[in-house]
Image (cartoon, rainbow, N blue to C red):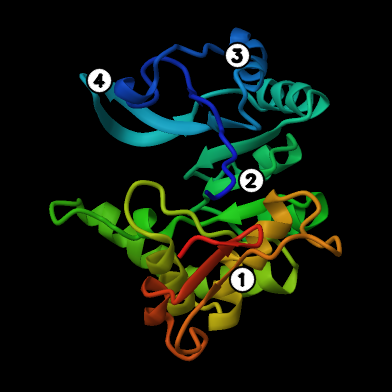
Amino acid sequence: MPRLQAAGRFLAPAGQYFPALLPEDAPQQRLTELALGELTRGGRWVKVIADFPTVANGTPSGRPGATYSGEAIEAMTAAVHAAGGRVAAHVTTGIVSELVRAGVDSIEHGDAIDEAALHLMAQTGAAWTPTLCAVLSIPDNASEAARQRDADYRQRLPGLLALARRLDVPILTGTDTAGTVAREVALLAQHGLEPAAALAAATTTAYRFLAEGYDQPGQPTTLVTYEDDPREDLAVLVSPSAILIDGVRVR
């Protein structure tokens, strides 16, 4: 079976995330304590909800706002790093640079990311997981303002992805709850990444970022093969011919 890295439970204050996905309130004064608790439970990552709309009766409303101060995120991240863990931050507003300065390891979504934030990420080694399957899926009844934000992001995205590539910011595939890895690779390619780079976001780049010792010689082979070259046709990603995990053929 594939190796799995768990991120534990979502960390967010009450009223600023979906209640069904938030089994315990994480107020700012307990953020570090609860983050370290997720590592004790066996998680290797901590997932902090860094911004979110106000949630009433289970439904988000209004524009997202920051859930924690930059100082609280920085203190929590330092403690998690000292304990051997890493931090992924859900963020959809313009606080990406603040989170990167606080030391987070991965920006999840990041649809308000800008060039300054990408330059900071290149300095710190933070990764960007755009989750385009989710971010670019707006409902039919979306407001005109939401549609305009979507159009603006689609226009900016090719330049942002190209800059991230030039700066060697790790770009990773992530589906959220809205798609598949194959679809995410296709969307990355549609929005500016060359097919080989889009494939790397789901393979070599992801392995280097997530798996210690990936580049060391003598490691058992993990690979997927296809009848046709996915760099020529990304649609073949849904139909692998063979899958090897740590040298064992599982398909």
* Residue drawn at point x = 13 percent, y = 52 percent: 141
Crowding around mark 1 (Cα neighbors within 10 Å: few <14, some 14 to 19, many 20+) is some
Query: Which numbered disc covers residue 56?
Result: 4
Query: Which numbered disc covers residue 111?
Result: none
Rounded to the nearest whole Å, what is the CA distance between mark 4 and mark 3? Answer: 24 Å
Q: Are marks 1 and 4 in contact (CB under 8 Å)?
A: no
Earlier-in-chain disc, 4 versus 3: 3
Q: Are marks 1 and 3 in contact (CB under 8 Å)?
A: no
214 displayed left or right of 156:
right
Amino acid beneath label 3:
Leu
Q: Are marks 2 and 4 in contact (CB under 8 Å)?
A: no
Query: Which numbered disc covers residue 34?
Result: 3
Residue 194 visible in the snapshot = no
User: What element does badge 3 sit on?
Assistant: helix
Rounded to the nearest whole Å, what is the CA distance between mark 3 and mark 2? Answer: 19 Å
List the residue tagged with mark 2. Answer: 106
Residue 29: give x, y in percent of width and height.
Answer: 61, 8
Q: Nearer the viewer, residue 120 or 224?
A: 224
